Image: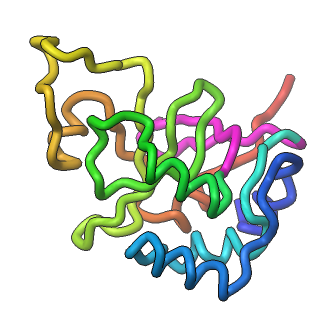
Amino acid sequence: MTLEEFVAVIRGEGGKAASDEALSAFERRMDLTLPQELKHFLKCCGGGRVIETPVEYLDERGAQLIPRRMYSLDEMQGAFNSPVDSWVPKALLSIGVDEGGNTIMLCLRKDRFGQIFLFDHECVHYPGDDECPDTIETIEEAEDYRLGYYAPSFRQFLDDLRVVETV
């Protein structure tokens, strides 16, 4: 799916399209750099709910997710300041949610910059749980529990999106 096709199915409850100035201010305030593809997306629509035409992500490995909302800059900052779970490594930025309430995340770490992950909210960690350590420092540790890798970049994530065929 092209960026333009994805933007066309995002409607309502979204942020306003981000300006270059707003993107630069966000990056300075958050002390991070966003991938160019994500910046372009935010400049086109600013985020919002995917409601017009259902779309799904399905790659060659069969990894599937159905995006329900893509975050605006304000929502990204709010999620970064109050992460979905203190257990999530700091190198991940929430950029949206899927239909099941799982968080779509972007990696900011240099060696995996721009990769897309899904944080499974149903695999909740409880302190003292023997199955999961009390703290997770790295993305690799998180992948052993409830963080799934989906795409090497936001561009590839968009490329792998397709309209859900209804019968």
Compared to residue 74, the image places residue 142 above or below, namely above
Residue 116, position in %: x, y? 43, 54
- Nearest the viewer among 91 and 38 is 91
Q: Quadrant of the C terminus?
A: top right
- In the figure, is residue 9 to the left or right of 103? right
Colour theme: rainbow
Q: Quadrant of residue 125?
A: top left
Compared to residue 19, the image places residue 69 above or below, namely above
Residue that appears at 10% across and 12% down:
130
Compared to residue 141, the image places residue 73 above or below, namely below
Residue 55, position in %: x, y? 73, 42
Residue that appears at 64% across and 53% down:
71
Residue that appears at 58% across and 70% down:
38
- In the figure, is residue 112 to the left or right of 154? left
The magenta stretch is: 52-70
- Nearest the viewer among 155 and 100 is 100
